[in-house]
Amino acid sequence: MDMTRRPRRLRQDGVRGLVSETSLDASDLIAPVFVDATTDERVPIESMPGHERVPVSEAVERVEEVLATGVEAVIVFGIPESKDARGSRAWAEDGVVQEAVRRISAETDAYVITDVCLCEYTEHGHCGVLAENARAGEGLTVKNDETLDLLARTALSHVEAGADMVAPSSMADGQVGAIREALDAAGHDNIPVMAYAVKYESAFYGPFRDAADGAPAFGDRRHYQMDPGNRREAMRMARRDAEEGADVLMVKPALPYLDVVADVRREFDHPVAAYNVSGEYAMLQAAGEKGWLDTTESAYESVLSIKRAGADLILTYFAEDIAASLS
Ligand code: PBG
């Protein structure tokens, strides 16, 4: 037996760290923050233990909590006071995200990213303008091209409130280009776009839809979000968004799609983001509550794996816990 090679030599204390290939840094992480216009106090999110919806009046405090852990960036989601057919509170100057971002950017040092979508703002819960025959289940539910202008207006209103980066997530074809054009026309050519370029139709968004009240009232998102079995299509999506001017390419969810994260990393020289989504968070919390695994350790391992697969930026509900454990 040839025992010349003993990989265990490099796993010993002292050298293990020197040869480690991947490490997490608080500056890799983006913490999601939920701001809710329907409440005056913090409301725990049942399916995401440890997370809350906060009123606008506490948005700054919430972000200060994030910054105190060492995380430097947040992505803001809004729950509006009212919804309508087109989602008009999404681009309102006094909308929940706009009000929160105005305060956060004025009063904190956080790098502020906003999610640009309509599903939290439309009464039907879809990510855009509904087709006439949608409820009857005939044809496509969301009208693509009519949605683009609304997304562009929403993104612009976020930036005018002080957002540093916008992240379109509606999966409307052309959303990156429409937003890039609107921002540039208004003189915001320095604001980057992080495209939810590769977004799958996933059961792992369940807790988020509870958190942000954005579940579709009927139907599903299959005709605008991607089929989970499609890997080559991810390259077409990423290429299309890159061509439209995306600065950062995101893959979402993260853990069930690490092959796709690795593909995008290999094929593009853009920064790659991955969204460790609500269901990925909830399942580790639930198993931890049962005593079936250690949530802190499994969360760290999950996020480390997302980085190892090739993500530069990681959106995760574990951001604060992980950053706090690093410092
Ligand atoms: C908005 C949006 C969603 C998420 C981020 N932006 C919901 C969805 O597409 O259904 C999900 C995030 C998560 O599950 O953590 N469209």
Image (cartoon, rainbow, N blue to C red):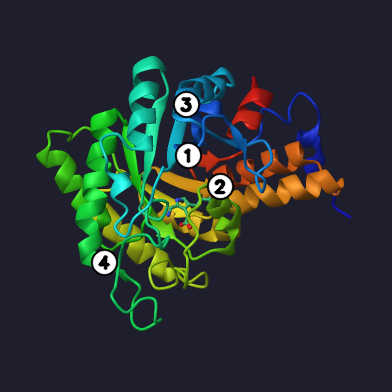
Tell me the distance, in whole angstroms, between the alpha carbons under discs 3 and 4.
32 Å
N-terminal label among 2 and 4: 4
Give above or below for 97 relative to 102. Answer: below
Residue 125: image location, x then y, percent: 43, 60
Q: Nearer the viewer, residue 293 or 103?
A: 103
N-terminal label among 2 and 3: 3
Q: Which residue is mark 2?
A: 211
Residue 76: image location, x then y, percent: 43, 37
Tell me the distance, in whole angstroms, between the alpha carbons under discs 1 and 3.
14 Å
**Measuring 33% from the left and 66% from the top, which residue is drawn there?**
236
Q: Which residue is mark 4?
A: 144
Give above or below for 142 relative to 57. Answer: below
Q: Nearer the viewer, residue 77 or 188?
A: 77
N-terminal label among 3 and 4: 3
Q: Are marks 1 and 3 in contact (CB under 8 Å)?
A: no
Residue 223: image location, x then y, percent: 39, 73
Q: Which residue is mark 3?
A: 59
Name the image quarter holding the C terminus.
top right
